[in-house]
Amino acid sequence: RLLAALSSLSGHQLKQRSLLSRWSVRYCCYWIPLVSSVLGSTHAFHPIYRIAPTSPLRPFHSTSRLFLESRQDLEQLRVVDLKDRLKERGLKVGGRKAELIDRLLSEPEETDMVRRSPRKAAVAAKIEDDTEEREEGEEEKPKKRARKTKAKTDEDSAKKSPKKKKKQPEQRITEVDDIPKLWTEEKAKENGSYTFKIVSWNVAGLRAFVKKQPEALQKLVKDHDIDLLCLQETKLQEMHVDDPKMGFRGLLEEQGYKDYWSCSTEKKGYSGTAVFIKERGGKKKAKQASIGSFFSAKSTDAPKTEGKESSSLPVSIETLIPTSVTYDLGKSIDNEGRTIIMEYPWATVTNVYVPNSGQTLQRLDYRTKEWDKFFLEFQKKKQEDLKKPVIWLGDLNIAHKAYDVWNDGAKHHIKQAGVTPQERESFTQQLDDGFIDAFRQLHPEAKGHYSYWSQRSGARPVNKGLRLDYFVCSPQLFEEGSEVVVRDSYMLYDYYGSDHGPVVLELEIKSK
């Protein structure tokens, strides 16, 4: 009954309609004919058993007499079906229907008996079709049209599928732009004003620094006639500062400077800041505030100053020295010795060493969510309570803009302390609250001016650095009508001994 039901269907129809599963077709088309032929059944050579290579069965060679097809059966098939059979047998597919049937019924040559993979057979058949069409003299225009159609299709697909954005290459800035000197002593004399110079320098461990460059600090204050020298990352404890053998107390006493130190009590040999204030002859020294476990300042008379004599100063001495020096930010954040606050008559100046987020960014949240926010509020409160501008300076551990790092855009920056998006955004918020980055304000397009270079990779000779050291000021200090005006800011590249370089801020203090 099954054979009778299937007898009306050709092999191609059976495949297209998927009436039977793979195994059912194999059962009907292989085993039933074989058993029937043995039993002498009249159905043994029924066309349904000769399902050609289009069926899920493995292809049979034409030499298999059991499955040999008759001309009558083949004439019932369409030309498309005949060509499909010829392709899968690796035979030529060109010609009329009668020629195709003859080719299927003819005994194959020895070369045609070689089994081909379906992919190779299809490629070979296509080549043969093209060859025959050329021989028959068919025109090439239809093919060209097909290519155009294909091109249009490709264009349409390109429009539908958006192109991937090309990644912007990282910048490479190692050349130092020339920047003009915006302020000179000649201009100060013309205006009858005084140039107040502040220098900030991260020494990356003062003990090692002094061993490598024993006269670097002395040379720096002498060459540039500095009024205030601020150091960060001294890595000293109180015992080191007070040890006479080490000589840190009074380090620049001969040059006319009074020193103040803030040391970490949280961790030994960690962080730490120091300031050296140029004192004036006959003036009472600034009083060092008590900070609990911190030591007291040495009570010695200030030496006479070299350089600018007090008698020739266009401004009063009281203007040039702080009225007090403190260390307290009002929180336990002070126990790492990161700040020294100096109260000048015209501004509050804070020497600060901002916490580094760490190699694995383990302190990133502490730095951006706690330290930065608290320190900003401290500065805003100072400015509001005392009714005078503020300046904070030092190693802020941030390369804020693209020009502040030599290879901005590098992939690893999202995981590198100092250039993470979180740190940059946090510093942006500080500036947006009403403060100004002095160097970038004065030199907005300057490239290649860095203050830090990694010692591990030998980056300083080739200037592969970052600008991590800043002077952040209140906007009033950039107004021409102010008593004190920011005039210039720049880096000093001729001083070594640390992985940082000194940075300078010049202010004009006008005479009253």
Image (cartoon, rainbow, N blue to C red):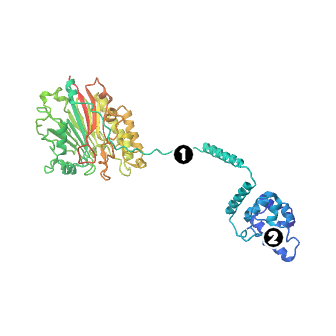
- Choose top left, top right, bottom left or bottom right for residue 90: bottom right
Residue at the image position 41 percent from the left and 49 percent from the top: 412
Q: Is residue 159 left or right of residue 61?
A: left
Residue 18 seen in this snapshot: no
Q: Position of residue 146 (x, y in %)?
A: 69, 48
Q: Position of residue 456 (x, y in %)?
A: 31, 53
Q: Is residue 150 left or right of residue 505?
A: right
- The single residue placed furthest to the right in the displayed view is 42
Q: Which residue is mark 1?
A: 164
Regarding mark 1 in the picture, which secondary structure is present there? loop
CA neighbours of label 2 inside 10 A, class few (<14), some (14 to 19), many (20+): many
Q: Position of residue 238 (x, y in %)?
A: 20, 48
Regarding mark 2 in the picture, which secondary structure is present there? helix
Question: Tag 1: residue type?
Answer: Lys
Residue 82 seen in this snapshot: yes
- Choose top left, top right, bottom left or bottom right for residue 99: bottom right
- Residues at marks 2 and 1 touching, judged by CB atoms closer than 8 Å: no
**Closest to the observer: 83 or 464?**
83
- Relative to 419, say whether 85 is above or below: below
**Closest to the observer: 418 or 300?**
418
Instruction: Determine the CA span between mark 2 and mark 1.
Output: 56 Å
Question: Tag 2: residue type?
Answer: Phe
Residue at the image position 38 percent from the left and 52 percent from the top: 360
CA neighbours of label 1 inside 10 A, class few (<14), some (14 to 19), many (20+): few
Q: Which residue is mark 2?
A: 67
